[in-house]
């Protein structure tokens, strides 16, 4: 029996194993994940973002316990900073989730950020599917707290909570950062600190009085601005109520499915971009052509724009290099096209011949 089948039967060890395979980019992990897809996609995914030190881990643990008490089946994906030595997660978030760890039915998985842009781990979306397959109907993703780049979380979550502290600093900078822009709920945590009330009034005036235009051009959701102190449970019930209200809004308005589709497409395009960049560097960073161009840039004899344009000529070589299994699949498709199936047959063949002559 495969990992996917075991997960659908509730095997926690298989879930942990599959998440590890996805993190490592193993083909086996992607193959097993494909078997899970018909059984997932309906869970409420909650993202928690905010600057480092705003209390994301504590808040995530507290609301997880509350949702579990409402008979929700909860999973947590805690994105941790990456160890510079072992490239693994530093596991700092787990320290502040002791209550959630002790609660029945809450699955917590720490995941190394590994430098992936947007404050989340590359494997986070796959891990979400695994937790759904395990039976979780509510998944919380806590970002690493990447600050100004922490917007990829928006593509993974149905509801995004932006967590700040009263001394959040220059409001304009945070607006530019996108932390407020992606938030469906804004939380001022550590509300016992000076300035909490002033911050609440200022942000309520900006976000809470009128309905704003949503991320995908939709109207109707009024962004709540809440005061909390997660370490003492203050305001946690109101936060859970706001999360439930947003989920209800998405469902009843009919926006949830469309938003899910749009975000899935955008995240896939983001993954494609990152994978192309990764493969390019792996193949070309040590090449003499790459080193020569970079040396010219460093010496000021070539501008960066021209350098990039010249290096992009190497991308075609990367696109021509595919794994054996994928190459075999493409050969089958080519055979099918050769029999007259599909459209644009001549164009595909012509392009293939052109690349062959160019080598």
Image (cartoon, helix red, strand yellow):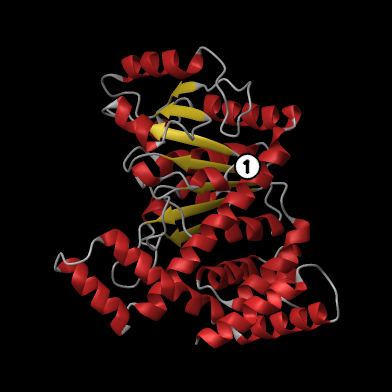
Q: Residues within 10 Å of mark 1 (few under 14, many from 20)?
A: some
The image quarter containing residue 214 is: top right
Residue picked out by circle 1: 68
Image quadrant where one finds the N terminus:
bottom right
Out of 107 and 169, give the one closest to the viewer: 169
Q: Residue at x 28, y 24 (%)?
A: 193
Q: Residue at x 62, y 87 (%)?
A: 324
Number of disc labels: 1
Residue 352 x/y as whole percent:
63, 80
Q: Do we see residue 34 in this rendering?
A: yes
Residue 247 x/y as whole percent:
66, 33
Report the residue that reaches farthest toward the left.
299
Out of 163 and 256, give the one closest to the viewer: 256
216 vs 49, left or right, is: right
* Position above or below: 210 against 18: above
Q: Residue at x 41, y 41 (%)?
A: 56
Residue 108 x/y as whole percent:
53, 55
The image quarter containing residue 169 is: top left
Q: Secondary structure at mark 1?
A: helix
* Position above or below: 258 against 217: below
Q: Residue at x 75, y 32 (%)?
A: 254
Out of 273 and 41, give the one closest to the viewer: 273
Residue 306 x/y as whole percent:
31, 63
Q: Do we see residue 104 in this rendering?
A: no
């Amino acid at each position: 029996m495969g990992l996917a089948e075991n997960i659908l039967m509730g095997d926690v060890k298989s879930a942990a194993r599959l998440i590890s395979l996805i993190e490592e980019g193993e083909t086996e992990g992607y193959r097993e994940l494909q078997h899970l897809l018909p059984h997932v996609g309906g869970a409420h995914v909650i993202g928690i973002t905010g600057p480092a030190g705003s209390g994301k881990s504590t808040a995530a643990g507290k609301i997880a316990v509350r949702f579990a008490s409402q008979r929700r089946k909860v999973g947590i994906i805690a994105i941790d900073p990456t160890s510079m030595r072992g490239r693994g997660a530093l596991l700092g978030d787990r320290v502040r989730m002791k209550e959630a760890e002790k609660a029945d039915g809450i699955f917590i998985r720490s995941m190394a950020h590994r430098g992936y842009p947007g404050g989340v781990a590359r494997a986070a979306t796959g891990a979400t599917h695994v937790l759904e397959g395990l039976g979780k109907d509510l998944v919380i993703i806590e970002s690493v707290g990447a600050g100004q780049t922490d917007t990829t979380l928006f593509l993974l979550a149905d509801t995004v909570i932006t967590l700040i502290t009263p001394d959040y600093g220059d409001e304009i900078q945070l607006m530019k950062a996108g932390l407020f822009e992606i938030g469906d709920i804004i939380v001022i945590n550590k509300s016992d600190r000076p300035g909490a009330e002033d911050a609440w009034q200022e942000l309520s005036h900006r976000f809470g009085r009128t309905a704003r235009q949503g991320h995908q051009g939709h109207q109707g959701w009024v962004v709540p601005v809440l005061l909390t102190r997660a370490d003492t449970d203050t305001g946690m019930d109101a936060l859970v109520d706001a999360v439930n209200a947003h989920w209800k809004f998405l469902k009843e308005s009919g926006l949830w499915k469309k938003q899910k589709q749009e975000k899935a497409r955008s995240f896939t395009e983001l993954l494609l971009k990152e994978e192309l960049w990764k493969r390019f560097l792996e193949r070309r960073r040590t090449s003499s052509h790459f080193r020569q161009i970079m040396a010219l840039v460093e010496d000021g004899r070539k501008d960066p724009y021209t350098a990039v344009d010249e290096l992009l000529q190497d991308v075609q070589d990367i696109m021509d290099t595919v794994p054996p299994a994928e190459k075999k699949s493409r050969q089958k498709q080519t055979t099918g096209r050769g029999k007259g199936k599909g459209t644009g047959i001549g164009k595909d063949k012509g392009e293939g011949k052109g690349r062959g002559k160019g080598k």
